Amino acid sequence: MAMYRHTYQSVPESEEQMMDNLQSILAQHKIEDSLAGAIMLTVSEAFVNAFVHGNKRELSKTIQVEIEITPLTVKASVIDQGERHIDLSGDRPVPDPFSENGRGIAIMRHYATSLIFSGSKSGGLKVSIQFDRKKYYESKILK
Protein backbone atom coordinates (compact mmCIF):
# COMPACT_ATOMS: atom_id res chain seq x y z
CA MET A 1 0.00 0.00 0.00
CA ALA A 2 1.21 3.49 -0.85
CA MET A 3 -0.11 6.55 0.97
CA TYR A 4 0.32 10.19 -0.02
CA ARG A 5 -0.83 13.31 1.82
CA HIS A 6 -0.57 16.87 0.49
CA THR A 7 -1.87 20.12 1.95
CA TYR A 8 -2.70 22.99 -0.39
CA GLN A 9 -3.41 26.65 0.23
CA SER A 10 -6.98 27.63 -0.53
CA VAL A 11 -6.12 29.62 -3.66
CA PRO A 12 -7.18 29.02 -7.29
CA GLU A 13 -3.63 28.12 -8.39
CA SER A 14 -3.55 25.15 -6.00
CA GLU A 15 -5.81 23.04 -8.21
CA GLU A 16 -3.16 22.90 -10.94
CA GLN A 17 -0.48 21.95 -8.40
CA MET A 18 -2.74 19.26 -6.94
CA MET A 19 -3.48 17.87 -10.41
CA ASP A 20 0.24 17.73 -11.26
CA ASN A 21 0.96 15.87 -8.01
CA LEU A 22 -1.94 13.46 -8.56
CA GLN A 23 -0.96 12.76 -12.16
CA SER A 24 2.59 11.99 -11.04
CA ILE A 25 1.37 9.57 -8.34
CA LEU A 26 -0.95 7.75 -10.74
CA ALA A 27 1.80 7.45 -13.37
CA GLN A 28 4.27 6.18 -10.78
CA HIS A 29 1.83 3.38 -9.91
CA LYS A 30 0.99 2.69 -13.57
CA ILE A 31 -2.73 3.29 -13.09
CA GLU A 32 -4.58 2.53 -16.34
CA ASP A 33 -5.33 5.59 -18.49
CA SER A 34 -9.13 5.35 -18.32
CA LEU A 35 -9.09 4.93 -14.54
CA ALA A 36 -6.48 7.67 -14.12
CA GLY A 37 -8.69 10.05 -16.11
CA ALA A 38 -11.70 9.24 -13.94
CA ILE A 39 -9.67 9.72 -10.76
CA MET A 40 -8.27 13.04 -11.99
CA LEU A 41 -11.72 14.36 -12.90
CA THR A 42 -13.36 13.17 -9.68
CA VAL A 43 -10.65 14.46 -7.34
CA SER A 44 -10.60 17.77 -9.23
CA GLU A 45 -14.36 18.16 -8.72
CA ALA A 46 -14.00 17.43 -4.99
CA PHE A 47 -11.08 19.86 -4.74
CA VAL A 48 -12.94 22.70 -6.46
CA ASN A 49 -16.00 22.06 -4.26
CA ALA A 50 -13.75 22.20 -1.17
CA PHE A 51 -12.27 25.51 -2.32
CA VAL A 52 -15.51 27.19 -3.41
CA HIS A 53 -18.20 25.73 -1.14
CA GLY A 54 -16.25 24.43 1.86
CA ASN A 55 -13.53 27.01 2.39
CA LYS A 56 -15.58 29.78 0.72
CA ARG A 57 -12.43 30.87 -1.15
CA GLU A 58 -10.85 32.00 2.14
CA LEU A 59 -7.12 32.29 1.52
CA SER A 60 -6.24 31.50 5.14
CA LYS A 61 -7.70 27.98 4.87
CA THR A 62 -6.21 24.82 3.40
CA ILE A 63 -7.36 21.72 1.52
CA GLN A 64 -5.84 18.35 2.30
CA VAL A 65 -5.70 15.58 -0.31
CA GLU A 66 -4.89 12.01 0.69
CA ILE A 67 -4.29 9.25 -1.86
CA GLU A 68 -4.02 5.55 -1.00
CA ILE A 69 -3.15 3.01 -3.67
CA THR A 70 -3.39 -0.76 -3.26
CA PRO A 71 -3.49 -3.52 -5.87
CA LEU A 72 -7.30 -3.55 -5.59
CA THR A 73 -8.30 0.06 -4.97
CA VAL A 74 -7.41 3.69 -5.36
CA LYS A 75 -8.81 5.86 -2.57
CA ALA A 76 -8.79 9.63 -2.39
CA SER A 77 -9.94 11.93 0.38
CA VAL A 78 -10.38 15.68 -0.02
CA ILE A 79 -10.75 17.56 3.26
CA ASP A 80 -11.64 21.23 3.60
CA GLN A 81 -11.77 23.57 6.59
CA GLY A 82 -15.34 24.69 6.04
CA GLU A 83 -18.39 24.07 8.19
CA ARG A 84 -18.90 20.35 7.48
CA HIS A 85 -22.19 20.88 5.68
CA ILE A 86 -23.56 19.38 2.52
CA ASP A 87 -27.24 18.99 1.74
CA LEU A 88 -27.82 15.60 0.19
CA SER A 89 -31.37 15.21 1.46
CA GLY A 90 -34.14 14.66 -1.03
CA ASP A 91 -33.80 14.50 -4.76
CA ARG A 92 -31.17 16.66 -6.35
CA PRO A 93 -32.18 18.21 -9.66
CA VAL A 94 -30.60 16.71 -12.74
CA PRO A 95 -27.69 19.00 -13.54
CA ASP A 96 -27.60 20.87 -16.82
CA PRO A 97 -24.83 19.13 -18.80
CA PHE A 98 -23.80 22.45 -20.36
CA SER A 99 -23.60 24.38 -17.09
CA GLU A 100 -20.31 24.89 -15.27
CA ASN A 101 -22.15 24.73 -11.95
CA GLY A 102 -24.13 22.04 -10.15
CA ARG A 103 -22.55 18.98 -11.77
CA GLY A 104 -19.76 18.12 -9.32
CA ILE A 105 -21.50 15.56 -7.14
CA ALA A 106 -23.18 13.91 -10.13
CA ILE A 107 -19.81 13.60 -11.88
CA MET A 108 -18.17 12.15 -8.77
CA ARG A 109 -20.98 9.62 -8.31
CA HIS A 110 -20.78 8.58 -11.95
CA TYR A 111 -17.08 7.74 -11.93
CA ALA A 112 -16.42 6.56 -8.36
CA THR A 113 -17.17 3.09 -7.01
CA SER A 114 -17.95 4.68 -3.65
CA LEU A 115 -18.49 8.30 -2.57
CA ILE A 116 -18.91 9.21 1.11
CA PHE A 117 -19.35 12.64 2.71
CA SER A 118 -18.46 12.94 6.40
CA GLY A 119 -17.17 15.39 8.95
CA SER A 120 -13.43 15.68 9.37
CA LYS A 121 -11.54 15.78 12.67
CA SER A 122 -10.73 19.44 11.99
CA GLY A 123 -14.40 20.36 11.59
CA GLY A 124 -14.57 20.57 7.81
CA LEU A 125 -16.07 18.23 5.24
CA LYS A 126 -14.28 15.08 4.13
CA VAL A 127 -15.11 13.61 0.73
CA SER A 128 -13.94 9.99 0.52
CA ILE A 129 -13.76 8.57 -2.98
CA GLN A 130 -12.95 4.96 -3.84
CA PHE A 131 -12.27 3.27 -7.15
CA ASP A 132 -12.28 -0.53 -7.38
CA ARG A 133 -9.54 -1.07 -9.94
CA LYS A 134 -10.73 -4.44 -11.28
CA LYS A 135 -14.44 -3.57 -11.38
CA TYR A 136 -13.71 -0.22 -12.98
CA TYR A 137 -11.51 -1.74 -15.64
CA GLU A 138 -13.98 -4.56 -16.42
CA SER A 139 -17.02 -2.28 -16.55
CA LYS A 140 -15.32 0.16 -18.92
CA ILE A 141 -13.99 -2.59 -21.21
CA LEU A 142 -17.35 -4.36 -21.47
CA LYS A 143 -19.25 -1.21 -22.50
Image (cartoon, rainbow, N blue to C red):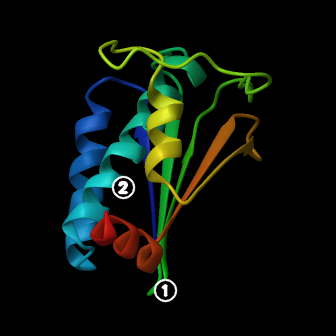
Query: Relative to residue 133, is residue 48 depicted above or below?
Result: above
* Residue shown at the point (31%, 62%) measured from the top left: 143
Q: Nearer the viewer, residue 92 or 22?
A: 92
Residue underneath mark 2: 39
Residue 91 at what x, y percent from top left? 72, 22
Three-letter amino acid code at disc 1?
Answer: Met
Residue underneath mark 1: 1
Q: Quadrant of residue 113?
A: bottom right
Query: In the rendered view, does 22 fall on the left or right side of 60?
Result: left
Earlier residue among tags 1 and 2 = 1
Q: Residues within 10 Å of mark 2 (few under 14, many from 20)?
A: many
Residue 93 at what x, y percent from top left? 59, 16
Query: In the rendered view, does 15 fall on the left or right side of 134?
Result: left
Q: Residues within 10 Å of mark 1 (few under 14, many from 20)?
A: few
* Residue shown at the point (53%, 27%) measured from the top left: 61
Query: Relative to residue 35, is residue 78 depicted above or below?
Result: above
Residue 100 at what x, y percent from top left? 33, 15
Query: In the rendered view, does 58 fall on the left or right side of 101?
Result: right
Tag in front: 1 or 2: 2
Query: Relative to residue 129, is residue 140 depicted above or below?
Result: below
- Determine the CA span between mark 1 and mark 2: 17 Å
Q: Quadrant of residue 117?
A: top right
Q: Nearer the viewer, residue 84 or 101?
A: 101
Query: Relative to residue 119, is residue 70 depicted above or below?
Result: below
* Residue shown at the point (73%, 23%) measured from the top left: 83
Callout 2: SS: helix
